[in-house]
Image: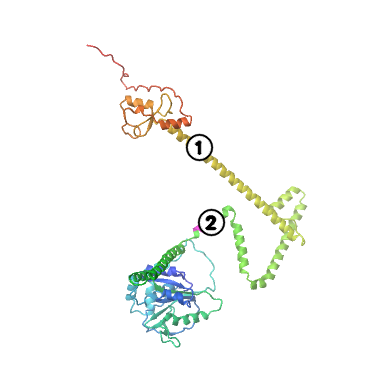
């Protein structure tokens, strides 16, 4: 609580935030649940046992204490000595007064409690404010900013504060970090007129009386309960039912209901995690880019004007409308008079200028969008005509923009289609071409021959490889059969015939004989008979 942020940030009063906060400290076996009504007995029974309550309210200076300050009470209490830390202060004061074997406070709080056990309330609060681990976890729920807004300070700003209600040794205490000591409220089962052993029934009137101190229109209150981990509670109940000797139908029905509740708890924790990530996320870069896009599309000004109109309508309540109606009418009259005077002055200047032709006068009027001065009788019709003309021009521009975008899209599609056709043609041409000599297959000479490795070459290249005793595929280097020339690729031949590309080809030209420098080309030497 407070106006100065200091080293601790303000965090939202939300059960998801507080649940992740206590889990981050290392506390196990607890979770925070929001209470929409303290009179809902059915909902309270589902959450029991309730270890404590956290109450958020609008803080007012000089408020009287309802109860008795007890500095020597058997309660662990740390006073708040730094601003904005009341949320963590309330939950830690509450946790350190829980005496239950079903929960674990974790090393952080256990060490903190043992270290500050003999300190007074002020020194405990100072130690808590200097705990780096708790402060970092508390500040992790603040939203990151990459710019600082130099806004004027608000003179009167509402301050909100967290306090805790906790039962300790059959007594109910209010733990307010702004007080010097715990506040004793009542004894359990000894309050006058109340014989209930449930401490919630006893603390309920205190919370109601605190709320009633405010005006009827004040709704800024929040109440949360510290309860055991509901998922573990339901799982433990299922384990108990599995060992009980009862009617199988009743047991099965209750187990099914508990399993549904467990799934609800899983979904709730997932939702808490998503919401906390959104709280930490900095949306400012996204908003800036959104405004840039809206401005680029020419929609930002219209949206701002529309938002301003909505704000004016929502801000003017019926009582305010009665008070400011006359003032608004006077302002409208002044605007109309100024508008008429400017129009008359401009028309006189244009008419007195002999060098300005009629067409030029019309052009100037259109550019400045200055209509002729309307009379009192024709004020509304002229305005309606102007708005209609603007709407027509805007509609025409939008149609032209749509037509232009459609034309660009059509050209893009045609270009993509041409590129695809060209690519398909190149792929087909490549499939019907020998990869060695780069010549298309034909009927007479370059017949497609299928190697053992399923690669296809023309008969001319295959025969040359056979003459050189090379039975290795040039692509995969696998050895093929010697009778590879007899193995035609009939599937490829059928495909070429279907596309009318299997035609007669020219005879191959013999490859040039390689010459070795300093030697004559090889020739047939006649054999000499002896």
Pick the front one: 449 or 87: 449
- Indicate whether residue 182 is drawn in magenta: no
Count neighbours of disc 1 (C-alpha within 10 A) and say few if under 14, some if 14 to 19, many if 20 or more. few
Task: Identify the secondary structure beneath mark 2.
Answer: helix
- Check residue 290 in the rendering and tell me which mark sits there, or answer none: 2
> Which quadrant of the view contains residue 195?
bottom left
At 36% from the left and 29% from the top, the residue drawn is 487
Residue designated by label 1:
421
The Cα–Cα distance between marks 2 and 1, rounded to whole angstroms, is 39 Å
> Which quadrant of the view contains residue 349?
bottom right
Residue 482 percent location from the top left of the image: 31, 28
On the rendered structure, is 208 left or right of 336?
A: left
In the image, is residue 287 above or below residue 119?
Answer: above
Pick the front one: 404 or 262: 262
Task: Identify the secondary structure beneath mark 1.
Answer: helix
Residue 205 percent location from the top left of the image: 48, 82
Q: Which residues are magenta?
A: 285-290
């Amino acid at each position: 609580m407070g106006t100065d942020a200091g080293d601790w940030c303000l965090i939202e009063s939300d059960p998801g935030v507080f649940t992740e906060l206590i889990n981050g400290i290392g506390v196990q076996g607890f979770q925070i649940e929001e209470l929409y009504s303290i009179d809902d007995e059915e909902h309270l029974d589902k959450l029991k046992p309730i270890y404590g309550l956290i109450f958020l309210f609008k803080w007012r200076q000089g408020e009287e204490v309802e109860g008795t300050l007890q500095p020597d009470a058997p309660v662990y209490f740390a006073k708040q000595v730094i601003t904005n830390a009341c949320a963590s202060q309330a939950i830690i004061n509450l946790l350190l007064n829980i005496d239950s074997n079903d929960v674990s406070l974790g090393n952080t709080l256990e060490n903190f409690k043992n270290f500050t056990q003999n300190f007074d309330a002020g020194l405990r609060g100072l130690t808590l404010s200097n705990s780096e681990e708790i402060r970092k976890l508390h500040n992790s729920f603040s939203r990151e900013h990459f710019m600082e807004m130099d806004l004027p300070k608000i003179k009167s700003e509402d301050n909100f504060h967290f306090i805790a209600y906790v039962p300790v040794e059959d007594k109910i205490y209010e733990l307010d970090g702004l007080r010097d000591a715990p506040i004793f409220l009542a004894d359990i089962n000894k309050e006058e007129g109340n014989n209930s052993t449930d401490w919630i029934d006893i603390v309920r009137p205190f919370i109601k009386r605190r709320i009633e101190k405010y005006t009827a229109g004040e709704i800024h209150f929040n109440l949360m309960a510290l309860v055991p981990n509901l998922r573990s509670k339901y799982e433990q109940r299922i384990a108990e039912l599995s060992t009980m000797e009862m009617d199988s139908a009743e047991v099965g029905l209750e187990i099914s209901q508990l399993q549904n509740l467990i799934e609800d708890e899983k979904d709730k924790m997932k939702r808490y995690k998503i919401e906390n990530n959104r709280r930490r996320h900095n949306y400012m870069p996204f908003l800036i880019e959104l405004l840039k896009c809206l401005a680029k599309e020419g929609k930002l000004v219209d949206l701002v004007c529309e938002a301003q109109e909505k704000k004016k309508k929502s801000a003017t309540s019926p009582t305010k409308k009665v008070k400011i109606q006359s003032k608004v009418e006077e302002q409208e009259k002044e605007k109309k008079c100024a508008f008429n005077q400017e129009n008359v002055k401009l028309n006189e200047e244009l008419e007195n200028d002999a060098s300005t032709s009629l067409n030029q006068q019309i052009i100037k009027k259109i550019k400045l969008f200055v209509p002729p001065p309307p009379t009192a009788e024709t004020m509304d019709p002229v305005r309606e005509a102007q708005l209609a003309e603007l709407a027509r021009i805007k509609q025409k521009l939008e149609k032209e923009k749509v037509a232009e975008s459609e034309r660009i899209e059509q050209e893009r599609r045609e270009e993509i289609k041409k590129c695809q056709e060209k690519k398909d043609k190149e792929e087909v041409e490549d499939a019907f071409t020998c990869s060695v000599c780069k010549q298309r297959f034909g009927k007479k000479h370059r017949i497609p021959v299928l190697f053992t490795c399923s690669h296809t070459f023309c008969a001319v290249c295959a025969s040359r490889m056979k003459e050189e005793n090379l039975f290795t595929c040039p692509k995969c280097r696998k050895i093929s059969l010697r009778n590879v020339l007899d193995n035609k690729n009939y599937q490829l031949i059928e495909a070429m015939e279907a596309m009318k590309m299997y035609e007669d080809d020219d005879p191959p030209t013999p490859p040039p004989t390689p010459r070795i420098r300093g030697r004559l080309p090889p020739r047939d030497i006649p054999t000499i008979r002896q």
